[in-house]
Amino acid sequence: MQTMEKIAFLGLGRMGRPMARRLAAAGYPLTVWNRSPGRAEGLVEAADPAAAVAGADVVVTMLSDPQALAQVAARIRAALAPGALWIDMSSVGPRAVAELGAGLPPGVALVDAPVMGSVGPAAEGSLTVYAGGRDADLERAVPVLEHLGRVRRCGGPGSGAALKAVVIGAIVASVTVVGEVLAVARELGVPQEAAVQALASGPLAGVVARARSTDADFPVRLAAKDLALAGGGPVLSAAREVLLAHPSIAERDLSAVVTALQGG
């Protein structure tokens, strides 16, 4: 019987905890760590990130932003075992991935593998995983990642993070636009359901469905962060300003911007 690689999973937030549970359920020897203790709920939890990665064959990070990733990286670099594979699944953009790769100890490989999907798909293992890295490193990472969702190989190092920034930028900006045009519909006296049905019957059907979702859990503050990672173009920058202008919905799902733009 093949020995399964030992995994350290760092970051047990909304997405990280169900993802870590799937890897544990698949039989991987798993040690977890989270900045705020008490989220392991039956998983083997280390007191600090360096202890979690000591002796691990694979390290998975699922952290909130580039700053959090850099802070954790500084704490674990010296503890990484030669030959370890680091799979960063955080949404941090290609620049942060490049900085992470430049600071790796000799013999440690890196794959960037951010995901699309929310908490439900994370628990079900039906995320979309955008994976970038060297071919040999991807070959090693894919068996782990396939427990979390459908893996799309994007190319060399940083390509997964880059594609994620493109896709999430389009989705977040489009949902914000739908919220604004529904506010315009109200001002013009167009019934909301008539506007929604008209939008949903055309090429914006998927965006309208996301804008009206009741089971997604992608906080507005993280959506604004991801827009910043996607770049500073005028449309994406404007959408980010809209999200930041409604701090009361920062912890609510992105769909809350639709109501917020109508004064709700």
Image (cartoon, grey):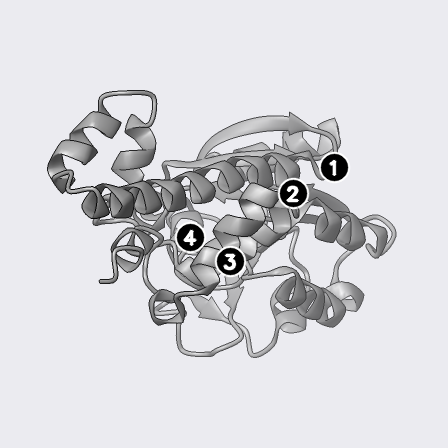
Is label 3 or label 4 in front? 3
Can residue 90 be seen at all in this image of the molecule? Answer: no
**Disc 3 and disc 1: Cα gap in Å?**
30 Å
Question: Which residue occupies 63% across, 27% down?
Answer: 154
199 relative position to 31: left or right: left
Mark 1 nearby-residue class (10 Å; few <14, some 14–19, many ≥20): many
Q: Residue 118 placed where, x, y %?
A: 36, 47
Extreme-right residue of the structure: 106
Q: Tell me the amino acid under the disc marked 2.
A: Asp
Answer above or below: position of 8 versus 58. Answer: below
Can residue 129 be seen at all in this image of the molecule? Answer: yes
**Disc 4 and disc 1: Cα gap in Å?**
27 Å
Q: Report which residue position mark 2 lands on.
A: 112
Q: Which disc is residue 24 wearing?
A: 4
**Disc 3 and disc 4: Cα gap in Å?**
40 Å
Question: Which residue occupies 60% across, 26% down?
Answer: 153
Disc 4 on helix, strand or loop? helix
Q: Report which residue position mark 3 lands on.
A: 241
Q: Residue 230 placed where, x, y %?
A: 61, 45
**Disc 1 and disc 2: Cα gap in Å?**
7 Å
Q: Is mark 1 in CB contact (under 8 Å) with mark 2?
A: yes
Is label 2 or label 4 in front? 2
Q: Tell me the amino acid under the disc marked 1.
A: Pro
Q: Is mark 3 in CB contact (under 8 Å) with mark 1?
A: no
Front residue (pair 255, 96): 255
